[in-house]
Amino acid sequence: MKRKVVSLMMVTAISAALLAGCGNDKGGSDAGKENNDNQTQDVEDNNSDDTNEAEKPTGEGSVYYMNFKPEVDAIWQDIAAAYTESTGVPVKVVTAASGQYEATLRTEIAGTNAPTLFQINGPVGYQNWKDYCLDLSDTDLYKNLSDQSLAVTGDDGGAYGIPYTVEAYGIIYNNAIMEKYFALEGAVAKSMDEINSFDTLKAVVEDMTAKKDDLGIQGVFASTSLLPGEDWRWQTHLANLPIYYEYKDAGVGDMAEIEFKYSDNYRNILDLYMDNSVSAKGLLGSIDVAGSMAEFALGQCAMIQNGNWGWGQISDVSGNTVVAEDVKFMPIYFGVDDANQGLCVGTENFWCINSQASEADIQATKDFVSWLITSDEGKAYMSKSTDEGGLGNAAPFTTFTEAERSSDPLAVEMYKWMESGKTSVSWNFTSFPSQTFKDNFGNALLEYANGNMTWDEVASYVVEQWAAEKAAAAQ
């Protein structure tokens, strides 16, 4: 799958970066981002008054949104209250506990008053929920989509899932540390402009490791988080690149079997991370994402692989030494098409309207999502950063102007790369066989880091398990 960087029209429409939580969908946004269990509200708490069975105003529609991200639950409650105050239409938001979205949705959608608005993660999620997905082709949500090819479509060409944000990930770097390095005698590069390929990145990183005492850092990269459940940056996000290039070569968007033909490229960048990081390889099985993000925030390292949702974790760390203007992005140079490669850009966040809801509720829900992307108040909630009381979404709709973009430093960097003319790496991890496949891949990576598996054994395992799970799913 080759997708050129989002068109200029889309770029000018995009409005902010997403502080995620990959909540936590270990594979992408959501693709797999950090748990925020301290903010998670269990459905039982949200439904303490049996709100799923609450009576609705006679003859009026209402909205029930099943929210995926625990870390923005409070903001969604504010949005619901604001919309109800403005329109009189009841809006209920229930947030699933972290990691429990699919199970919670299955329970709730079977209730008397089922969700009218819910989320899927892309084409795979659509196959699970297509019996409940309304064709949204005639809605403002679809008509104002900057790039309508981003919608999840059915065999009939209908638009059944509409992305409400896009995200990007790559290598985040601390420009202050990089400038300090460039000023050192004998530095192998003199500016970030010279770091535009894997070979140059490797040379710079290894030289920085040799000079880490002069730079005042403990390692060039933050620790590689291989703690089970915290390894999504490698078994999902980094693993997306070899699959992206293999799909691209074949001109497809999925494969029943893979060669893992770019496994050596994958190993090269993973080894670069592990061999030049804050923590030794033998300790990586105990490292979580929050810990590695804290290392970056405290200036203990110069680089970390993560996404634009990571700014909140950086800025919120007590004792943070990294200022916003020094937080920058570069692509994960992979040694395949480095001259043209941009950031990894995509989404796993698609809104769906319940086709089995009443006509009144369907219309109320259409009106609600239209308000979110067309009204000044709704757009402010969508685009403002989380510390400003917004959702921090980079909303891909023509209704958002350039002036409505977020000032979040990683959002600014995302826009810059999307406008650079480079080719964004599309998110293909939504086609990975299963979460089990990814978890087992992560376990194999830990065994590799600990010296208990060779890379050839890891690569063979990935190829075999991919084929086995795809074949089983096809039966």
Image (spheres, rainbow, N blue to C red):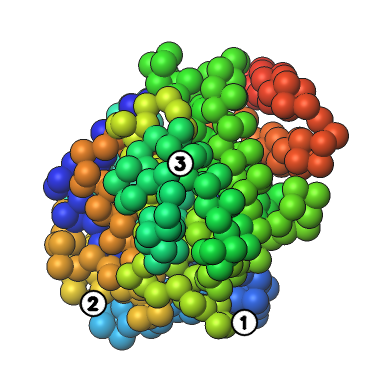
**Circle 1 SS class:** loop
Q: Which of the marked residues, 1 or 2, is nearer the chain's N terminus?
A: 1
Q: CA distance from mark 1 to mark 2?
A: 29 Å
Q: Position of residue 151 (x, y in %)?
A: 32, 40
Front disc: 3 or 1: 3
The reply, left or right, for residue 105 in relation to residue 391 is right
Judging depth in this view, the residue of 448 and 127 nearest the camera is 448
**Residue type at numbered disc 2:** Glu
Q: CA distance from mark 3 to mark 2?
A: 44 Å
Q: Residues within 10 Å of mark 2 (few under 14, many from 20)?
A: some
Q: Residue at horizontal 63%, vertical 38%?
A: 271
Q: Position of residue 427 (x, y in %)?
A: 44, 38
- Position of the C terminus, as image quadrant, is top right
The reply, left or right, for residue 157 in relation to residue 19 is left
**Residue type at numbered disc 1:** Asp
On the image, numbered disc 3 is attached to which residue? 201
Q: Residues within 10 Å of mark 3 (few under 14, many from 20)?
A: many
Residue 317 sits above or below residue 139 on the image: below
Q: Is residue 24 visible?
A: no
Q: Position of residue 250 (x, y in %)?
A: 43, 14
- Position of the N terminus, as image quadrant, is top left
The reply, left or right, for residue 127 in relation to residue 383 is right
Q: Position of residue 266 (x, y in %)?
A: 57, 31
Residue 15 sits above or below residue 354 on the image: below
**Residue type at numbered disc 3:** Leu
Q: Are marks 1 and 2 in contact (CB under 8 Å)?
A: no
Specify the label residue 377 is tagged with: 2
Specify the label residue 49 is tagged with: 1
